[in-house]
Image: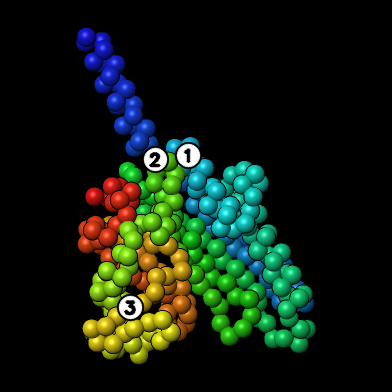
């Protein structure tokens, strides 16, 4: 009986250790540049690449990198290879754009892409990757982007809109409005209405509604985060408006599968 008990305890410990298995990243960087008719064209890549951890999770992270940056998984041997392939791919795309989209007389100071992938949050059940960047393809100004994806560590599931339950977005508009007022540093919806676009948005006194961001919500340091990209709900000068709401305030509105991981 004692032997059976010890065996059961050892098995339970092994399961616990496996579920809490740490995820390890290593940061890889690369840059590639060329000149096209005296126009510098370059790409800088910095990526936190998974090098160890639960097999299903590591596979999911690599698949997400592959799909987001359109590099076949079979070609991603390691983080160094990925960073180099992405930098070369970006430069090849800009080289083609230069030939197809710009005239010789266009005054283009440079073309560039900066891509960053980083781990922004991790606990024993979840890990969040951030994808951000800064690009200039000609025009009045550069473009920036930032979004995150939260994964379940046990099996690598990537969460998206299913973080919320059905109709939750409509039910938390007061919290969304409060967070956006804080982002824009205004005291009222009327003040915020002067900043936000009008199409699809209601922002008048106590009446408020703003559509969900194009990119999915994610978890960061105990908060649920939603980032609107440039021009999504406000002018470029407003940056990328963020909605940040503590998870503890959102428990009634979370999908059951996700709520079980954060309660």
Q: Which mark is residue 209?
A: 3
Contact between marks 1 and 2 (CB within 8 A): the answer is yes
Q: Determine the image quadrant of residue 21.
A: top left
- Residue labelled with disc 2: 154
Q: Position of residue 41 (x, y in %)?
A: 68, 71
Percent x, y for residue 153?
39, 43
Residue at the image point whose x is 48% and y is 80% from the top: 231
- Identify the secondary structure beneath mark 1: helix
Q: Which residue is mark 1?
A: 56
Asked if the residues shown at circle 3 and circle 2 are in contact, with their CB atoms under 8 angstroms apart, the answer is no
**Can see residue 142?**
yes
Camera-side residue: 49 or 36?
Answer: 49
Q: Is residue 233 above or below residue 59?
A: below
Residue 26, which numbered label?
A: none
Q: CA distance from mark 3 to mark 1?
A: 38 Å
Mark 2: secondary structure: loop
Position in image of residue 226 (x %, y %) = 37, 66
Q: Mark 3 against mark 1, which lies toward the viewer?
A: 3
Label whose residue precedes the other's in the sequence (3 or 2): 2
Left or right side of 9 for 63: right
Residue at point 66% right, 46% down?
A: 75
Quadrant of the rendered image containing residue 35: bottom right
- Tag 3: Cα neighbours inside 10 Å, few (<14), some, or many (≥20)? some
């Amino acid at each position: 009986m004692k032997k059976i008990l010890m065996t059961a305890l050892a098995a339970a410990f092994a399961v616990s250790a496996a579920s809490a298995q740490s995820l390890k990243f290593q940061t890889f960087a690369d840059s590639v540049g060329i000149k096209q008719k005296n126009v510098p064209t370059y790409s800088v890549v910095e990526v936190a690449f998974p090098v160890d951890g639960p097999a299903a999770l590591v596979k999911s992270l690599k698949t997400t990198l592959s799909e987001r940056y359109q590099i076949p998984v079979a070609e991603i041997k390691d983080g160094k290879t990925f960073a180099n392939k992405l930098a070369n791919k970006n430069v090849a795309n800009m080289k083609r754009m230069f030939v197809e989209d710009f005239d010789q007389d266009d005054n283009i100071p440079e073309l560039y892409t900066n891509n960053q992938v980083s781990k922004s949050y991790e606990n024993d059940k979840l890990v969040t990757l951030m994808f951000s960047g800064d690009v200039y393809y000609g025009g009045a100004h550069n473009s920036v982007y930032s979004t995150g994806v939260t994964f379940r560590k046990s099996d690598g599931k990537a969460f998206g809109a299913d973080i919320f339950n059905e109709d939750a977005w409509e039910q938390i508009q007061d919290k969304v409005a409060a967070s956006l007022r804080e982002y824009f540093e205004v005291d009222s919806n009327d003040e915020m209405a002067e900043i936000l676009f009008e199409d699809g948005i209601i922002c008048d006194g106590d009446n408020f509604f703003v559509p969900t961001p194009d990119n999915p919500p994610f978890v960061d340091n105990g908060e649920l985060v939603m980032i609107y990209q440039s021009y999504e709900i406000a002018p470029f000068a407003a940056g990328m408006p963020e909605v940040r709401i503590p998870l503890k305030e959102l428990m009634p509105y979370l999908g059951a599968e996700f709520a079980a991981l954060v309660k």
